[in-house]
Image (spheres, grey):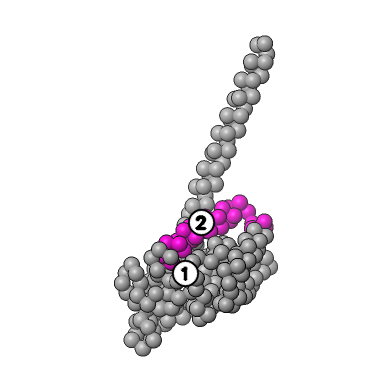
Amino acid sequence: MLRHFPKVNVAYAHRKRDYFIAAFTFFCVAVCLVSDATASLEKQNALGVTGWVFLIGWLLGENREVRMQVVIAVIFATIGEHFASPFMGGYTYRFENVPAYVPPGHGLVYLTAVALGRSGLFLRHGRIIAALVVLVCGAWSLWGISGFAERGDAVGALLFCVFLGYLFKGRSPMVYLAAFFITTWLELIGTALSTWSWAVIDPVLGLPQGNPPSGVAAWYCLVDAVAMGGAGPLLKAAKTLRDLLTIGNVKKMLIRVQVTSEK
């Protein structure tokens, strides 16, 4: 079950950059959501521009694989946002739109999960952190279906089970573990400020869900899994295409040289 977890008794290195990325994103998420709670559409757009600037700035210090993962995460999550919110009504933003800061925000959230997941803290203490998360999120999920909660959260309990699958069966458990912290942080702040609200009844399953659902991190883990799984093949395809174009250009050049020599 824990075969993909980091090895124990290893002195994994601490990189300041990883912690800076995480601290920066946690802080900016709070500032952005508090600002958006009473913001106009114009201010939302300004927050979006700022988000892109920050995201691109951080990506300058990452390798090609992480950059590709972030690109995939942004595209996939943005499509998912438009499907789940305006189209399906699973949750609704204040202006019934997808705010401009959401796409770059997903990029920053994914990058934060990667940064924390590779940090010395998570690599050294992954098992302890995982146990803490399972206990906390498990208690949250049980509360949602106990009958004592203000609104039922059967969807949250189902998502919690999915999250456990990612955590203990996925190949990158530290990324999924880190995703729990940043996504729970932003969901609790966003829903508390009514920046967005989850539907009382999930439109697909027809089951009650919390605001937010307790296992909401599972949705973000899906984004992470798609990003990590898709980056390698896309980079390989891009390299193949680049090689083919290079070969094609060389052939054209040789043909031109041959034609010139014949003249």
In the rendering, at what x and y percent does residue 30 appear?
Answer: 59, 76
Q: Residue 6 carries which label?
A: none
The residue indicated by pointer 2 is: 75
Q: What element carries label 1?
A: loop
In the rendering, at what x and y percent does residue 7 appear?
Answer: 53, 66
From the viewer's side, name the closer residue of 136 and 37. 37
From the viewer's side, name the closer residue of 128 and 249. 249
Q: Which residue lies furthest to the bottom in this view?
A: 148
In the rendering, at what x and y percent does residue 150 appear?
Answer: 39, 86
N-terminal-most mark, 2 or 1 = 2
Q: Is residue 235 above or below residue 196?
A: above
From the viewer's side, name the closer residue of 231 and 72. 72
Q: Any magenta on residue 70? A: yes
- Give the residue at x 50% y 71%: 95
- Give the residue at x 48% y 54%: 229
Quarter location, residue 38: bottom right
Q: Any magenta on residue 167? A: no
- Give the residue at x 60% y 75%: 35
In the rendering, at what x and y percent does residue 220 appear?
Answer: 47, 66
- Give the residue at x 37% y 83%: 151
As shown in the figure, which amino acid type bears the numbered disc 1? Glu
Q: In which quarter of the image is the C terminus?
A: top right
The residue indicated by pointer 1 is: 96
As shown in the figure, which amino acid type bears the numbered disc 2? Ile
Helix, strand or loop: magenta stretch: helix
Q: How many other residues sit within 10 Å of disc 1, few (<14), some (14-19) or many (≥20)?
A: few
Q: Residue furthest left?
A: 206
Does residue 52 appear anywhere in the picture? yes
> Mark 2, mark 1: which one is toward the viewer?
1
What stretch of residues is rendered in magenta?
A: 59-85
Spatial CA span between label 2 and label 1: 20 Å
Q: Quadrant of the N terminus?
A: bottom left
